[in-house]
Image (cartoon, grey):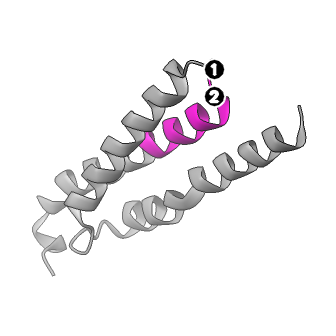
C-alpha cells in the first residue's frame, strides 16, 4: 500500500468516526429535539451516492470511499431512527 492509500484510509477512518459522539450522546440522553432531520437525510443520501461512486468507479472499487461511507450511512441511519423513535416519547419534548 502506497502513501496515498494510507492517507485515503486515514481520511476514511476520521470521516467515519465523526458521527460516533453524536450517536452515543443521542442514544444515552434520548434527546432528539435539536437534531436536524433534513441534515441527517442529506448526509444519508450523500453517503449512498458516495458509496455508489466508490463501488462502481471505472478505476475499480475505491476501498477507503466504500468503507467510510458504509459506516457513515449506518451511523446516520441510526440517528434518523433515533429521531423518529425518540420523538414519540413525551419526555423528550423539552
Q: The C terminus lies in which quarter of the figure? A: bottom left
Cβ–Cβ under 8 Å for marks 2 and 1: yes
Neighbours of disc 2 within 10 Å: few (<14), some (14-19), many (20+): some
Query: What residue lies at 26% left-to-right and 47% top-to-bottom?
Result: 81
Vertical placement of residue 62 versus 42, above or below: above
| Residue 72 among magenta residues | yes
Q: Residue at x 54, y 29 (%)?
A: 54
Q: Nearer the viewer, residue 89 or 1?
A: 1
Q: Is residue 25 magenta?
A: no
* Residue lying at 56% horizontally and 31% vertically, measured from the top left: 66
SS under mark 2: loop
The residue that mark 2 highlights is: 62
Residue on which the image places disc 1: 59
Q: In the rendered image, which quarter is residue 79 located in? A: bottom left
Near mark 1 (Cα within 10 A), the count class, few <14, some 14-19 or many ≥20, is few
Q: Which residues are magenta?
A: 61-74
Give the image location of residue 44, x and y in percent. 34, 45
Q: Work out whether 35 lies above or below 64.
A: below
Q: Quadrant of the N terminus?
A: top right
Q: Where is residue 69 shown, x and y percent of the image?
A: 51, 40
Query: Would residue 77 be visible to someone looking at this image?
Result: no
Mostly what secondary structure, the magenta segment? helix
Work out how far the residue at label 2 is from the one at label 1, CA to CA, in angstroms.
8 Å
Q: Residue furthest front?
A: 58
Left or right position of 68 against 44: right
Q: Is residue 46 left or right of residue 41?
A: right
Specify whether 86 is left or right of 14.
left
Looking at the image, which residue sits at the far right? Answer: 2
Q: Residue at x 24, y 66 (%)?
A: 36
Amino acid at each position: 500500500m502506497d502513501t496515498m492509500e494510507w492517507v485515503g484510509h486515514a481520511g476514511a477512518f476520521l470521516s467515519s468516526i465523526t458521527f460516533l459522539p453524536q450517536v452515543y450522546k443521542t442514544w444515552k440522553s434520548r434527546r432528539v429535539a435539536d437534531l436536524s432531520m433534513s441534515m441527517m437525510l442529506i448526509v444519508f443520501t450523500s453517503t449512498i451516492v458516495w458509496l455508489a461512486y466508490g463501488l462502481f468507479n471505472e478505476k475499480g472499487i475505491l476501498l477507503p470511499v466504500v468503507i467510510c461511507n458504509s459506516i457513515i450511512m449506518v451511523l446516520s441511519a441510526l440517528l434518523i431512527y433515533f429521531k423518529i423513535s425518540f420523538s414519540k416519547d413525551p419526555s423528550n419534548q423539552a
